[in-house]
Amino acid sequence: MKDIKMATIDERIEALEKKLKQEKAKKQKIEALKRTAESKAKRSMDTRKKILVGAAILAKVERGEWPQDKLIAMLDASLTRDDDRALFDLPALPTIPPVESMA
C-alpha cells in the first residue's frame, strides 16, 4: 500500500513539475510579447516625433522664419546615407577606401 501511495505522490509531483514548466514557458512568452509591443510603441512614438519636428521646421522655412540655407547646412552635416541626401539634392559623400592592414 505504501508503494502505491508513493507512486501516486511521485506521479502528482511529476505532473505538477510539468505544469510548472509549462506555466513558466507561458509567462516568458507573454513577457516577450509585452517587450515587443513596448518596443514597437516606442519606435512609433519616436517616428512621430521626428515627423512633427520636421514638419515644424519645414513650416518655419516656408514662412521665411528660418533660413533655408541653415536647414540645408544642417542636413548636409547630419545625413550620411546617399538616398537620404538625394532627397534634399545634396551630393553623395565621398567613400573612404578601406585601410589595408600591415599584417
Image: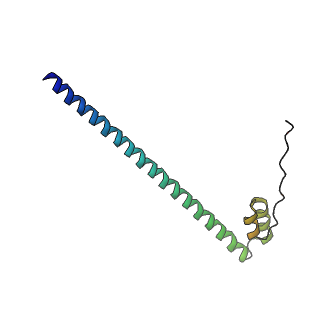
- Residue at the top extreme of this rendering: 2
- Which residue is at a point 23% across and 33% down the rendered structure image? 12
| Quadrant showing the N terminus | top left
Judge whether 24 appears above or below 57 on screen. above
**13 or 79: nearer the viewer:** 13
Give the percent coordinates (x, y) of residue 13.
26, 31
- Which residue is at a point 84% across and 45% down the rendered structure image? 99
Question: Is residue 40 toward the left or the right of residue 31 in the image?
Answer: right
- Which residue is at a point 62% across and 67% down the rendered structure image? 51
**44 or 15: nearer the viewer:** 15
Which picture quadrant has residue 42?
bottom right
Give the percent coordinates (x, y) of residue 33.
45, 52
Give the percent coordinates (x, y) of residue 87.
73, 70
- Residue at the right extreme of this rendering: 102
**9 or 66: nearer the viewer:** 9
Question: Is residue 103 toward the left or the right of residue 81 in the image?
Answer: right
Judge whether 94 appears above or below 100 on screen. below
Judge whether 50 appears above or below 14 on screen. below
Give the percent coordinates (x, y) of residue 90.
80, 67
**61 or 17: nearer the viewer:** 17
Judge whether 7 appears above or below 90 on screen. above
